[in-house]
Image: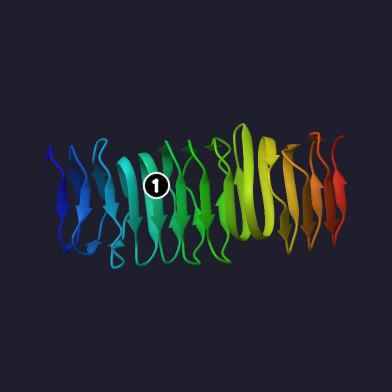
Amino acid sequence: DVNAFGLGTSTVTGNLVANSGGAITQSGALSIGGTTTLDAGAGDITLDDGGNDFAGAVSLTGGAVEINDAGTLRLAALDVASLDASSHGLLDLGAGSIAGDLVADSNGGQIGQSGPLEVGGSSTLDAGAADITLLNTNNDFVGAVSLTGGLVEVADRNQLTLGQVDATSLLALAATIALEQDIATTGDQTYAGAVLLDGDLALAAGGAVDFASTVTGPHALSVTADGHVGFGDA
């Protein structure tokens, strides 16, 4: 369809493929038994009905995208202007390009990925007490990454900027890790890369704090840990 169109309340036992030159919306819940492929060109995709159930992987091409699943949600190929994804179970963010901001809320499910993610804006991920695993070394998070979860692991191929972190433990892996805010964890904190201080900061850990490389910046750093504190370089 070359124009915007809406998807009504539907149950599809197999695959869903929808192509539009405009926005894709819905007027009722969708239940898709197979994979879902949606292409809105530069148009927005709004599939935020609380009753949606995408059993298979969902590929998305469009502008601003909102998608919700009543259970687990597995995304596949992404080429979107921004993404707001929510699930009520495991949330797989798939792989691909998000030109703007990424917001992901799993409502207590694990958050992961199937391939590298490129995010041009900020990233805000909330897994409740569940784990967040974004360790693909080809990830590129341009803006600040804020994380809420249990065991939180995130990698970036160049500079990773950490925003607010509320986690049991933290592993940050990048060539440079920029810290903008105080970070407190009940377990360990590991910074596998050169740390750049963007302000006066305090780190507090119920376990160990490990810096694998240099810690630099014209700012004060306070570290409090119940375990050891290790510096791999000056």
* Count of numbered labels shown in the rendering: 1
The image quarter containing residue 87 is bottom left
User: Residue under circle 1?
Assistant: 83
Residue 15 seen from this side: no
* Front-lying residue, 206 or 199: 199
Query: Which kind of residue does numbered mark 1 sit on?
Result: Leu
* Quadrant location, the N terminus: top left
* Vertical position of residue 82 compared to residue 229: above or below: above
Q: Residue at x 67, y 45 (%)?
A: 172
The image quarter containing residue 56 is bottom left
Element type at mark 1 = strand
Q: Is residue 156 left or right of residue 218?
A: left
Q: Residue at x 39, y 47 (%)?
A: 83
Q: Residue at x 73, y 44 (%)?
A: 191
- In percent of width and height, residue 105 lies at 46, 59
Residue 144 seen from this side: yes
- In percent of width and height, residue 53 lies at 29, 64
* Front-lying residue, 129 or 74: 129
* Quadrant location, the C terminus: top right
Q: Residue at x 55, y 41 (%)?
A: 136
* Front-lying residue, 229 or 46: 46
* Vertical position of residue 129 compared to residue 190: above or below: below
Q: Residues within 10 Å of mark 1 (few under 14, many from 20)?
A: many
Q: How is the structure coloured here?
A: rainbow
- In percent of width and height, residue 123 lies at 52, 46
Q: Is residue 74 left or right of residue 167?
A: left
Q: Is residue 13 left or right of residue 62?
A: left
* Vertical position of residue 40 compared to residue 54: above or below: above
